[in-house]
Amino acid sequence: MYNFKYHKVNTIQEASNLLISCDDPKILAGGHTLIPTLKQRLSQPSDIIDISMIKDLNKIDLEDNKIIIGALCTHNDIASSIDVLSNIDSLSKLAQQIGDPQVRHRGTIGGSIANADPAADYPAAVIALDAKIYTSKSIYNADDFFVEMFETAISPDEIIQKIEFTIPTASTYRKFRNPASGYAMAGVFIAKFDDIVRVAITGASSVVFRLRDLEDALSNNFTTSVLDNITIDSSDFNDDIHASSKYRGNLVKVLIEEAISDLI
């Protein structure tokens, strides 16, 4: 095992200072991405900065038609939050579907969106619910946050602090689970607001994305019939041993129809 320095911090400022001063640091929160990569030598940082004891990052607040979730909140925290369930039940149900109980009690929402795994569930909620991501240095709109597979807009010396979700008038999340670990082979999150509809797709492509043509159609006529005039281009969808790109394209259309039906 190679050597690295371990730092357990109590404040965002401590963590930020270490991110700047250390040669090649990595943030440790729930550890579900970092620990496996350390074991496989895919990551060999000079320093590990453990932020799990920063108390300001593990709370959920309801303010002005927004649900604000700290980056260290676990999937189970979100699934069991009365504020989340009462205001965005689809987000609560999404969290309930992640992995298994062990994963849900350790994995964090901040770690999940920072990792930008193309099969993760939260990115679809972040996009569809028009969230804002607050970091130690900036604020990002959801549409600008996810760049590519395992890549976001934040810089290496930034730490995600909280995610602010807009409460919709109605929303739902549908996904096709991988039978082994439960990740989204395809997932669809639809959120209705007063005058618009937002549709986000995860699991199908290299990065979460919106279906803007479908959003426009649903904003004018929220029925499954709009799918008759919508084409799902699956040419760039993921193609692997679990599902072909064509199969994922069909999954997306089926899940969209189910999601629309949920909200009619």
Image (cartoon, rainbow, N blue to C red):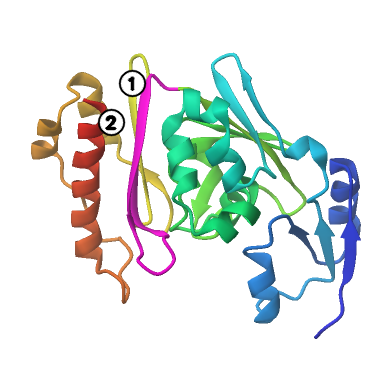
Q: Residue at x 57, y 53 (%)?
A: 104
232 or 117, which is in the foreground?
117
- Residue 190 in view in this figure: no
Q: In the image, which residues are magenta?
A: 168-188
Label 2: element kind: helix
Q: Which residue is mark 1?
A: 196
Q: Quadrant of the N terminus?
A: bottom right
In percent of width and height, residue 248 lies at 25, 60
Side of 84 where 133 appears, left or right: right
- Indicate the quadrant where residue 226 lies: top left
Q: Quadrant of the C terminus?
A: top left
Q: How many marks?
A: 2
Q: Main secondary structure of the magenta part?
A: strand
Q: Would you place residue 28 above or below residue 252 in this image?
A: below
Name the kind of residue labelled 1 in the image: Ile
Going from the N terminus, do you reach mark 1 or mark 2 first?
Answer: 1
Side of 47 where 153 appears, left or right: left
Q: Residue at x 61, y 41 (%)?
A: 77
Q: Which residue is mark 2?
A: 215
Contact (Cβ within 8 Å) of mark 1 with mark 2:
yes
In percent of width and height, residue 195 lies at 33, 15
Q: Residue at x 67, y 36 (%)?
A: 162
206 or 68, which is in the foreground?
68
Side of 22 where 170 appears, left or right: left
In percent of width and height, residue 113 lies at 57, 49
| Residue 182 shown in magenta | yes
